[in-house]
Amino acid sequence: MEKFPEWMGAILKLDAKPDQRICPNLSLMSASAPHIFGVRHLSPAAAWHLRQLLDRVRPKLVLIEGSDDADELIPHIVSPKSKLPIAILAYTTDAPVRTFVYPLATYSPEYQALVWCRENKARARFMDLPSSRLPGIDGS
């Protein structure tokens, strides 16, 4: 089970009541209602709070910002053989070459959500435009 490095836990465990900071009215929300968690990319604090929320809500499906044509990469991203940091890269083959990068590190909220899904047998999917339609990649 991938967890945060020791030094990161020491920083993040300063909050005595993480559930109250994540969503004070969580117990009042319907179990079937969608739960939206906005993240700051590559934020250890957001990743930690997101895992707290996922543990409490226990969703069956987690949608993550990312190009939806990268879904097939999810098993490789969370594989123990993968050595982070890693990135998903979309690019054009014609000049000028344009690229779009989704970086993932152990402390990325997106990565932690993917790992949580693997650990808890929940489905994970990326939910954004396919890479061929991203700004800069599609010619716009």
Image (cartoon, rainbow, N blue to C red):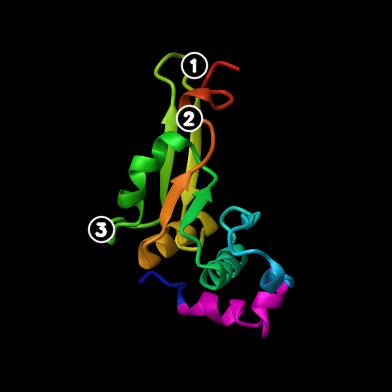
- Gap between marks 1 and 3 measured at Cα: 34 Å
Determine the image quadrant of residue 39: bottom right
Indicate the amino acid at tag 3: Lys
- Gap between marks 3 and 2 measured at Cα: 26 Å
The verdict on residue 16 being magenta is yes
Say which residue label 3 marks. 81
Q: Nearer the viewer, residue 21 or 94?
A: 21
Q: Which one is in front in this view, the residue at disc 1 or the one at disc 3?
A: 3
The stretch of residues the image draws in magenta is 6-23
Asked whether the beta carbons under mark 2 and mark 1 sit within 8 Å of each other, the answer is no
The dominant secondary structure in magenta is helix
Say which residue label 2 marks. 130
Horizontal and vertical percent for residue 107?
A: 50, 63
Say which residue label 1 marks. 96
Asked whether the beta carbons under mark 1 and mark 3 sit within 8 Å of each other, the answer is no
Q: Give the structural element (helix, strand or loop) at label 2.
A: loop
Residue 104 sits above or below residue 102 on the image? below
Determine the image quadrant of residue 47: bottom right
**Residue farthest to the bottom?**
16
Which of the marked residues, 2 or 1, is nearer the chain's N terminus? 1
Q: Which one is in front in this view, the residue at disc 2 or the one at disc 1?
A: 2
Residue in the image at 39% along x and 67% along y: 120
Residue in the image at 68% along x and 82% along y: 17
